[in-house]
Amino acid sequence: MLTKEQHEQLTQTSAGSPMGDLLRRYWWPIGTPVELDADPVRPVRLLSEDLILFRDEAGKIGLIGERCAHRGISLAYGIPQQNGLRCAYHGWTYNSQGQVVDMPFEPACLPLKITAYPVEELGGVIWAYLGPQPVPLLPRWEGLVRDDITRSINIKPLPCNWVQCMDNSFDPVHFEHLHGFYWDYYNRKHNIDRPVRTARHLKIEFDVFEYGVYKRRLIEGDAEDADDWKIGHPVIFPYTLVQGPGHNFTYQMRVPVDDTHTMHIVYAGKLRKPDEALQDQVPVLRDEVMYDEVGRVDAPWIVVQDEMVWIGQGAVSNRTAEHLVTSDKGVALFHSLLFENMEKVARGEEPMGIVRDPEENEIISFRRESSSRKLIQSGFSAQDPQDAGGRLRVAR
């Protein structure tokens, strides 16, 4: 149970708050090149800041403050030019550094500048850094840079704080209940002839490493040398769950829009087939699954079940009233790491996982289990991803 002050520190995202200052030390996914192809000027919100992401006619991408410095109109109405983004109201034009480079009618262009942040493209994603200098390297995670992978992106807005989304990743035991008992109940309630069984957890452990935490579990029926127990899978601090065996993977990125909204990005990849062409663009789907007032949704697949309970905790889960127990030791560890790294930033130190060495950053890979999380079900059709034993395998 946290104090009111600790709870506020944990969930606030604005600049100047302890958590907001920590989160600004990391690169964040802010958009995609595919979406800028469709509309080169896009209003975005990240870490409680309203911004404009744009691509000018020269192909340069910029991320600048929302308002024109002249009369305050939103630059979401801006017009891309060769030299930047032109305000629709009086023509003031801003380059990707936020500098005014043109003031029509005026005798001289004044040296005015609005907020601007560095952006980079990698892996079909546009990334933004909202923190202080010197800017760290954009991490080249394996899934973003391998050339033998076919990728896809799914983006979904959620009406809840990002921390409760990440808490779920440090909570292995929920699997047998939310994705087992609840799913089975859902199927019976909806007359779906598909019983659900899950294996019981025997042990869970969490190993801190340079970039985050390895989550490990031993389930009933597995030996001590099972991959899930001896390897597990990583959570990249502070906001990404890595899942999937071998060449197949997903990165679930929980991006804080503000204190009460999260953008859930599922970045998935699979080994490219021998006759499959290289992707020139990564396709993007923006999902608008609708939840009711308590987070319920009539769609029982795994990721949606997770999102349902994140939303079901309210816009900001009240951690002054919760009671963590032994199965929550991963959640407690995650909160401790957040507080520890907030304190590091307050002291002027570097938080965990920041990349500055170019050689280290050529490609960053992680240990991952060779087989996925097992969810045991019966009654699946031929196209369901079962193994020979009739078990549906789901990476969690």
Image (spheres, rainbow, N blue to C red):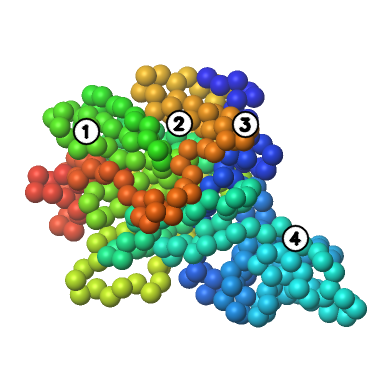
**Front in this rendered view, residue 165 or 210:** 210
| Spatial separation of the CA atoms under disc 4 and disc 1 | 51 Å
Which of pointers 4 and 3 indicates the residue nearer the eye? 3
Q: Residue at x 71, y 64 (%)?
A: 98
| Spatial separation of the CA atoms under disc 3 and disc 1 | 36 Å
**Front in this rendered view, residue 56 or 320:** 56
Specify which label sits upstream in the sequence, 3 or 1: 1
Three-letter amino acid code at disc 3? Answer: Arg
Q: Residue at x 49, y 44 (%)?
A: 354
Judging by the rendered image, the residue that carries numbered circle 1 is 230
Q: Secondary structure at mark 4?
A: loop
User: Hey, which quadrant is residue 320 in on the image?
Assistant: top right
Judging by the rendered image, the residue that carries numbered circle 2 is 334
Pointer 2 with pointer 3, Cβ within 8 A: no
Q: Residue at x 57, y 76 (%)?
A: 59
Mark sitting on residue 114: 4
Judging by the rendered image, the residue that carries numbered circle 3 is 347
Mark sitting on residue 141: none
Specify which label sits upstream in the sequence, 1 or 2: 1
Specify which label sits upstream in the sequence, 4 or 2: 4
Which of pointers 2 and 3 indicates the residue nearer the eye? 3
Q: Secondary structure at mark 2?
A: helix
x and y percent of residue 201 in the render? 25, 27
Whether 186 is drawn above or below 126: the answer is above
| Spatial separation of the CA atoms under disc 4 and disc 2 | 36 Å
| Spatial separation of the CA atoms under disc 2 and disc 3 | 20 Å
x and y percent of residue 241 in the render? 39, 44
